[in-house]
Image (spheres, rainbow, N blue to C red):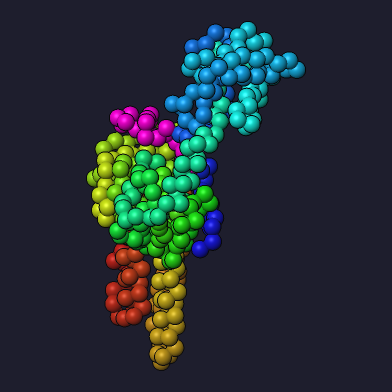
Amino acid sequence: MRDGALSPSNAVRRIIVGIGAALVLGVPGWAQVQMPDAREMSGIPRPVDDLPAGTVSVRLIRGDLSNNITGHPVELRVGDAARTANTDASGRAEFRGLPPGARIRATAVVDDERLESQEFQAPAQGGIRLLLVATDKEKEKRALEEAKAPAVEGQVVLGGESRIVIEPGDDRVAVYYLLDISNTSRVPVNPTVPFEFDMPPGSTGATVLQGSSPLATVNGPRVRVSGPFPPGDTLVRVASELPVSGGTMEITATFPAPFQQLVVFAKKVGNLRMSSARFERQQEMPAGADTLIVAAGGAVAAGQPVLLTLSGLPHHSRVPRTVALILAAAVVFIGVWAGGRPADPSSRSAERKRLVARREKLFQDLLRLERDHQRGRVEEPRYAGRRDQLVTALEEVYSALDDETGPDPADRTGLAA
């Protein structure tokens, strides 16, 4: 399946690039597990209220937050002018008294690498903190050497950034597996059991999403991630679709490695609800113009199924299509039946015409009732009672057409002709 066959919504894209469920759900330890890569935060200004008005604080680090760069010059462009300050023991260079609204950009050069922030305006109130992250070349060199080491037999786990994402749509539900396959050793490993799994039963259109590791491939509903797995994290992002046949659906997910922490997101559409015996905590959170249901559970062992139940799914009723098929079959049957019968006397012909006219009126009443129900114009109790009445009347009309010696169906149904 070609990449990109499924197109995630904006809400799902936000999850793919990373939404910190830890702070939302308050699960102990998650804030550390789901801390974003420092490089992803580099150069992004962050308004704060713990600095004096018109103050910008620039922190300079190498690789990660534990490696401050001290005594290093940082330049702040303020309009056409430039200011320079050296970082202190905590790796911060501070600039005060900036004119509100001035266009600002911070830069620094570390080991011939130029670091530059986004351009932003000096705030009228509060201050700005930002981070500039230089490449840790020694760390990258060690990682490259470790990745080239011979692979050994070992284990991988689905780390803290792994999550299942569900996005309901018209007559289908898209299921995304965003897996953070973690190898905590310092050398590549080959799992003792091949890393293969199936998308949920009944899935169609399985595909590997952009940003996934090239180690991942799909064959029908089966996903295979070929080893060896390098040290660190291997990102696998795959998706498929499930057809919706009613307002409730069960989704089963099973993986060949243990989930360290089960996290499930679902885009809230209509009255959607999500449940699982594995959930320990659940709540809703905004994601731009959308709302997400966020649920969390504990660890899940390798090979143990995760059963999710969705209810309140939006779906189109199949009743009109079913009724149309029944009517079409009935018309064919009646045509064949009528063509094989000898000519009826005039009295039976008149009775048959009356029954056919009544049948057509009941058909129209039933179709009108289904349309009104889909549009919310008929309350459920009244819809159910009226539909049963119409179906019973139709059954009796067909019985009378099949045996015109029977009682008049109009007399037995209580429905006005």
Front in this rendered view, residue 402 or 304: 304
Question: What residue sits 49% from the left and 15% below the top?
Answer: 89
Residue 351 versus residue 297 in the image, above or below:
below
Question: What residue sits 36% from the left and 53% below the top?
Answer: 189
Q: Is residue 62 magenta?
A: no
Front in this rendered view, residue 80 or 126: 80
Identify the image quadrant of residue 298: top left
Q: Please state if 99 lies on the left or on the right of 9 as rendered.
A: right
- Percent across and percent down for residue 148 are 46, 51
- Percent across and percent down for residue 40 are 52, 34
Residue 327 versus residue 153 in the image, above or below:
below
Q: Is residue 27 magenta?
A: yes
Q: Please state if 120 lies on the left or on the right of 326 as rendered.
A: right
Residue farthest to the right, as pictured: 80
- Of the 4 image quadrants, the one containing the C terminus is bottom left
Residue 157 versus residue 26 in the image, above or below:
below
- Percent across and percent down for residue 150 are 40, 55
Question: What residue sits 66% from the left and 22% below the top?
Answer: 105
The segment highlighted magenta reads: 14-35
Query: Is any atom of residue 19 visible in this view?
Result: yes
Across the whole image, how many numbered discs are drawn on residues? 0
Question: What residue sits 43% from the left and 66% below the top?
Answer: 220
Query: Is any atom of residue 417 visible in this view?
Result: no
Q: Please state if 394 lies on the left or on the right of 19 as rendered.
A: left
- Percent across and percent down for residue 122 are 63, 16
Front in this rendered view, residue 126 or 11: 126
Front in this rendered view, residue 291 or 231: 231
